[in-house]
Image: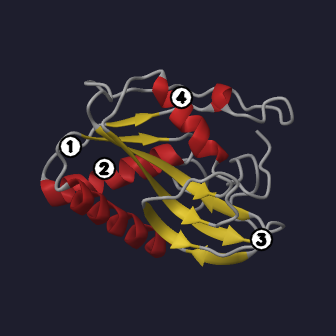
Amino acid sequence: MSAPPHEAAEPAESAVPDGRVVLDTGDIARALTRIAHEILERNKGAGDLVLLGIPSRGVPLARRIAARIQDVEGVAVPVGALDITMYRDDLRRHPARSPQPTEVPPGGVDGKTVVLVDDVLYSGRTVRAALDAMNDLGRPDVVRLAVLVDRGHRELPIRADHVGKNLPSARTERVMVRLDETDDAEGVWIR
């Protein structure tokens, strides 16, 4: 999918984008540690918790958060991937990327606290698509949202429960996230 100004760029672009560095490797690590602690506090532990990353960069972020939760609680939190490609409301206007696999952890999502994890929250349309996709998986007790960056400009009444960095931005600016797992660089840039 081409990367509009509101979404993290795909790996085909240069590893280190032009622009101002907003989060470096250390900042990302601290933000994810804080998010992991917030999730544990709100959930009162790791019981019945499932993390579902939204491809592509939400999946490695979910895995990192799960690793931090395991460090704190000593419990392995199930992590999966939730592809939203076919649930997007802009398929007619923008060419879609190839669907990514949806991986539901053993035990599913029924009756669980599911935390959706993504890299950038902008319009809210990706999250709406994720909620629609989750309907096909089951019925969690609670769904929460964790994002590395919230840049504002919502088009739908959606907000993140856990945010690494609130980044006020103009609609014309691009926020680009790079992670070691998907790219040859690590950081968040804005231009």
Q: Are marks 3 and 1 in contact (CB under 8 Å)?
A: no
How much space separates mark 4 and mark 1, taking CA atoms?
24 Å
SS under mark 4: helix
Q: Are marks 2 and 4 in contact (CB under 8 Å)?
A: no
185 or 146: nearer the viewer: 146
Disc 1: which residue:
76
Point out the frontmost of discs 4 and 3.
4
Q: Are marks 2 and 3 in contact (CB under 8 Å)?
A: no
The quarter of the image holding the N terminus is top right
Disc 3: which residue:
18
Asked if 163 appears above or below 48 in the picture, the reply is below
Disc 2: which residue:
66
How much space separates mark 2 and mark 1, taking CA atoms?
7 Å
Mark 1 or mark 3, which is nearer the start of the sequence?
Answer: 3
> At 62% across and 60% down in the image, what residue appears?
177
Q: Residue furthest right?
A: 93
Mark 3 or mark 4, which is nearer the start of the sequence?
Answer: 3
SS under mark 1: loop
How much space separates mark 2 and mark 4, taking CA atoms?
22 Å
Disc 4: which residue:
133
Q: Are marks 2 and 1 in contact (CB under 8 Å)?
A: yes
Q: Count residues near mark 2 (Cα–Cα under 10 Å), then give few for <14, some for 14-19, many for 20+.
A: many
The amino acid type, in three-letter code, at marker 2 is Ala
Q: Position of residue 180 (x, y in %)?
A: 52, 55
Point out the frontmost of discs 2 and 3.
2
How much space separates mark 4 and mark 3, taking CA atoms?
34 Å
Q: Position of residue 69 (x, y in %)?
A: 24, 55
Rendered image quadrant of residue 129: top right
